[in-house]
Image (cartoon, rainbow, N blue to C red):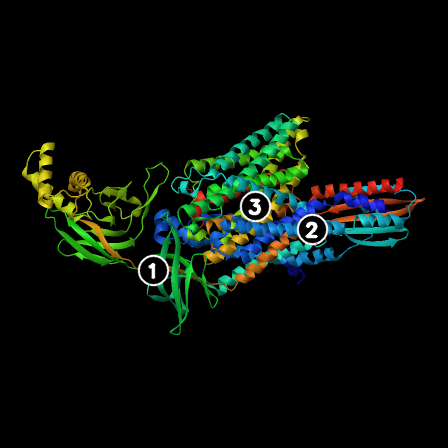
């Protein structure tokens, strides 16, 4: 019995020891680093690819992919809380006693030990008179004096509540941790995507490595989602118009934007992302067999369209109405330009390499010049490997398409390859398409066609897919949270700041004055100490000594 | 007896002028707040131009005059009421702020007209020149501080301090001018919401950091006469200046409209508060470095003229602590403000985002520093190293996280 209580004491002593606290702080800091270096909550397949099977399983079993929610990290935090509790339990009563205690009496021996100490002898003065002098000088200090034998003791304090600062700060951290814990325990935080016009009542969130869902007791309908832009082209605002539906009734309709969430019955609804909810797109296929045939493909994003005649399938993955790209050469200052609407899809087919394509609706304009249609092509199905392919021809202009074919036909007829024959063929082609009139932008058209002759010949596809039209449907990405611990955290934070201010800017300064009659005068000793800001106190004490000295001189000269 | 009390009062009571000036500033601030709440329909986008309009200035100056005159009469009638410690402590800082505002108004008069302002090419804006002036003066000041170590001369010392002040003024008004310019650009592009406080990208906050760090140092210098600390700190500030120049050279200094995530009043509070923390930790590390330097000199040479210039080891130790004592509460508050902002923008006050986590790491490191110092009685060499290491971690938290780690704070990213 005795032995066990002793060993418990050993543990308690260890828990409240400062060394443990410091070690805990450092360990917590080191552990936190891991989660910032290793990207958290990514796709498991990505981790597998990055680390290989062995290390993937080692890291996974340590929970490093969702590190801040593992038992061992939470255990560290719990340990910190425990250490704080023991610290407070052990030290708070002593500190409170110290705050309350204002012992006036001081022995000569302890007076001698003060670092800041000064003695005077005041002639022709009574101790009452001297006491008044001192009291006046220390008037913005808390004073307490007492008479013991023939001596007068005066104690003056400033910042007596300093120790309360410690108690405040440490309890505040405890309160914040409790608030955080109760938020995790009794709250939730998850995402939902709501397409325009649709509604949703479930949120998804990650638990460990799994995605879990939670049903809300209301539905959120997205009436509308819109993005507004600055005149400079950058997005300015993402705004969702939402309606909350509870028990089949519309209870609330409101707009939310980033930084301005909606609060409904303790649940906050944030604008967190947006994306394509299956926009309708229309591709135009330009056949490369010389037949000048075109064909329309109508589909929507996230769908796959299969062309039965050619066996080519188009899997639509994304659509964006704005595509701001860096147009500068590598190494040059970045220069952003909006290339307009574009659709992304994967093209698969017999006798061809599978490619991911980003096809733009508008021709590529640079410094006001039309440089023809543009595709981004990636052979790895990875958007990072996109290579720009300038097609030369402006496919949005049907006349150019016609002229291109007419030119090709005439070129075939005139065998030979010198410039004159090219020119003849072009002239004949012009006559075929436009008759005798000269179209506008002939020069651009001409250069497009010349360029495209060499480019298009190299393209191995049956047809070139170019985005022709679209009707966009957004989804709005919302984050829904409930955090019953949040207000506790704010209270803790307020106490923390308050406590830190007391701790740092209100050092406890103590002054003792001892007045002892001696002969026809008084012997005056002034001693002081502080627990913080020794440099500042040194100055303060010196000023005090100087002003007492000068007052004594004045008095003596009177 | 009465002559005695008189002598005492004159000793440490601020003059009537200080007292009334202090209240004039408070009146000024009250005037501004009253104008924002009563005088204009509140619009966060237009707050800066509204304040600098004649109506805004009128409210502010009426507030200042009323409060100043009232304080002067109170201090004249009842001198004991005119003794305010806060006044003597804060008034010189308010003077600095007012000086920067006044300088900005003067500089703003030389700004090109709206018709000449071009978003694509912002080279004709004045703030770039003012900030470049700051850069040059900071570097000059650093050179003076270092020279002062080797050639102890009171003129060089004074020059170092005055140029440091000049650079702070230039930086402060340069930033204020940039704030003004962001509205000019907004006017030029007919979208007033482009205007925003100049704490929105890495370039702007580097200017802010250099100025705040120097201000914290100058406050300590004023109080403790420690010019040798400047010889360590100002080269650090110059390093920041060079980083800013580099950012400018890669085209990161343009005024750009705010991304939606940054459109919040919290930005104006959270960001500068953070830099009070970072700046203090920089000063603490400079004190730590000087401590280590002095200790090395003491070991090799018993008498050196450097030793007479430098503060004693004990003083340096205390100065390091003092800087942490400024920085730690400020950094704590900044982190809490950041959490409050995150609760409004990201759906939770804490998301274990790399920036947040590194802020926590910095906080833990300095928390541990305070523990070993106060309760374990550590001091001297170990803590000097601790402040240096702590500052390196702080630098990583500030710049490194943006460069190497991805997360929600990505708008501070180097592109």
Label 2 chain ID: B
The residue where tag 1 is placed is: A475
Q: Are marks 2 and 1 in contact (CB under 8 Å)?
A: no
Check disc 2: other Cα within 10 Å, few if <14, some if 14-19, many if 20+: many
* C-alpha separation, residue under disc 2 versus residue under disc 1: 60 Å
* C-alpha separation, residue under disc 3 versus residue under disc 2: 34 Å
The residue where tag 3 is placed is: B277
The residue where tag 2 is placed is: B71
SS at badge 1 = strand
- Left or right relative to A94: residue A363: left
Residue nearer the viewer, A516 or A23: A516
* C-alpha separation, residue under disc 1 versus residue under disc 3: 41 Å
Where residue B409 appears, as percent x and y from the top left, is: 45, 49
> In the rendered structure, which disc, 3 or 2, sits on the residue that comes first in sequence?
2
If the image is split into quadrants, where does the C terminus of chain B sit? top left
Where residue A53 appears, as percent x and y from the top left, is: 36, 50
């Amino acid at each position: 019995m005795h032995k066990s209580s002793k060993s418990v004491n050993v543990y308690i002593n260890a828990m409240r020891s400062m060394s443990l606290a410091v070690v805990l702080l450092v360990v917590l800091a080191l552990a936190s680093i891991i989660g910032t270096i290793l990207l958290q909550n990514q796709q498991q397949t990505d981790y597998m690819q990055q680390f290989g099977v062995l290390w993937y399983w080692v890291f996974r079993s340590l929970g490093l992919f969702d590190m801040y929610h593992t038992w061992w990290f939470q255990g560290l935090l719990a340990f910190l809380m425990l250490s704080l509790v023991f610290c407070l339990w052990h030290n708070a009563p002593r500190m409170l006693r110290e705050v309350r205690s204002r012992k006036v009496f001081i022995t000569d021996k302890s007076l001698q030990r003060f670092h800041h100490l000064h003695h005077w002898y005041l002639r022709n003065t009574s101790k009452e008179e001297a006491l008044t002098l001192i009291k006046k000088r220390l008037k913005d200090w808390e004073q307490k004096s007492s008479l013991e034998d023939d001596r007068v003791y005066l104690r003056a304090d400033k910042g007596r509540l300093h120790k309360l600062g410690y108690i405040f700060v440490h309890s505040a951290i405890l309160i914040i941790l409790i608030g955080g814990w109760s938020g995790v325990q009794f709250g939730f935080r998850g995402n939902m995507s709501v397409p325009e016009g649709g509604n949703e009542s479930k949120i998804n969130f990650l638990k460990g490595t799994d995605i879990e869902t939670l049903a809300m007791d209301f539905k959120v309908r997205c009436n509308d989602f819109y993005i507004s832009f600055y005149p400079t082209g950058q997005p300015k605002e993402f705004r969702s118009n939402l309606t909350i539906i509870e028990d089949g009734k519309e209870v609330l309709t409101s707009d939310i934007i980033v930084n301005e969430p909606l609060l409904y019955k303790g649940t906050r609804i944030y604008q967190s992302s947006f994306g394509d909810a299956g926009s309708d797109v229309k591709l135009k296929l330009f056949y490369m067999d010389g037949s000048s045939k075109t064909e329309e493909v109508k589909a929507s994003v996230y769908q796959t369209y299969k062309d039965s005649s050619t066996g080519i399938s188009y899997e639509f993955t994304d659509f964006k109405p704005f595509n701001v790209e860096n147009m500068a050469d590598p190494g040059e200052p970045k220069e952003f330009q909006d290339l307009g609407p574009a659709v992304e899809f994967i093209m698969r087919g017999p006798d061809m390499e599978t490619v991911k394509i980003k096809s733009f609706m508008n021709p590529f304009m640079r410094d006001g010049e039309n440089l023809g249609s543009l595709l981004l092509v990636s052979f790895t199905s990875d958007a990072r490997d996109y290579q720009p392919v300038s097609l030369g021809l402006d496919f949005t202009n049907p006349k150019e398409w016609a002229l291109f074919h007419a030119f090709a036909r005439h070129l075939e007829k005139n065998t030979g390859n010198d410039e004159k024959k090219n020119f003849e063929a072009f002239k004949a082609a012009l006559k075929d398409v436009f008759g005798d009139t000269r179209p506008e932008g002939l020069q651009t058209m001409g250069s497009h066609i010349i360029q495209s002759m060499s480019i298009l010949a190299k393209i191995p596809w049956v047809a070139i897919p170019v985005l022709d039209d679209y009707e966009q449907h957004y989804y709005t990405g919302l984050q829904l949270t409930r955090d019953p611990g949040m207000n506790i955290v704010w209270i803790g934070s307020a106490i923390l700041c308050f406590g830190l201010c007391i701790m740092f800017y209100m050092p406890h300064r103590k002054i003792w004055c001892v007045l002892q009659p001696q002969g026809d005068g008084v012997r005056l000793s002034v001693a002081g100490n502080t627990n913080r800001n020794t440099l500042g106190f040194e100055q303060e004490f010196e000023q005090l000594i100087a002003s007492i000295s000068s007052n004594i001189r004045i008095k003596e000269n009177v | 007896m009465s002559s005695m009390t008189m002598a005492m009062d004159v000793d440490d009571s601020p003059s009537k002028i200080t007292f009334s000036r202090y209240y004039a500033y408070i009146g000024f601030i009250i005037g501004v707040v009253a104008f924002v709440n009563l005088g204009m329909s509140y619009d966060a986008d237009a707050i800066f131009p509204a304040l600098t309009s004649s109506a805004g200035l009128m409210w502010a100056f009426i507030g200042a005059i009323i409060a100043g005159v009232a304080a002067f009469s109170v201090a004249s009638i009842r001198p004991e009421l005119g003794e305010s410690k806060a006044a003597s402590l804060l008034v010189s800082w308010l003077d600095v702020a007012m000086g920067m505002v006044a300088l900005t108004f003067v500089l703003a008069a030389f700004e090109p007209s709206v018709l000449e302002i071009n978003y694509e090419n912002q080279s004709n804006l004045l703030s770039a020149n003012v900030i470049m002036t700051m850069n040059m003066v900071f570097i000059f000041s650093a050179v003076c501080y270092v020279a002062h170590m080797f050639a102890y001369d009171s003129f060089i010392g004074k020059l170092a301090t005055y140029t440091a002040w000049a650079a702070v003024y230039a930086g402060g008004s340069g930033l204020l001018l940039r704030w003004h310019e962001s509205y000019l650009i907004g006017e030029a592009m007919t979208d007033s919401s482009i205007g925003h406080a100049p704490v929105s990208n890495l370039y702007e906050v580097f200017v802010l950091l250099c100025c705040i760090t120097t201000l914290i140092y100058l406050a300590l210098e004023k109080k403790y006469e420690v010019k040798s600390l400047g010889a360590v700190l100002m080269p650090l500030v110059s390093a920041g200046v060079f980083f800013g120049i580099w950012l400018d050279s890669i085209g990161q200094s343009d005024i750009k409209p705010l991304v939606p995530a940054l459109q919040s009043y919290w930005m104006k509070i959270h960001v500068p508060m953070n830099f009070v923390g970072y700046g203090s930790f920089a000063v603490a590390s400079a004190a730590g470095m000087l401590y280590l330097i002095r200790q090395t000199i003491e070991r090799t040479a018993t008498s050196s003229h450097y030793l007479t210039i430098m503060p004693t080891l004990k003083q340096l130790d205390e100065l390091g602590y003092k800087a942490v004592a400024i920085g730690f509460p400020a950094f704590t508050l900044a982190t809490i403000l950041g959490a409050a902002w995150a609760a409004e923008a990201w759906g939770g006050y804490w998301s274990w985002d790399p920036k947040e986590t590194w802020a926590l790491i910095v906080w833990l490191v300095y928390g541990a520093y305070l523990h070993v110092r106060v309760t374990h009685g550590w001091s001297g060499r170990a803590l000097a190293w601790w402040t240096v290491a702590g500052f390196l971690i702080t630098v990583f938290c500030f710049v490194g996280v943006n460069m190497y780690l991805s997360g929600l704070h990505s708008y501070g990213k180097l592109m």
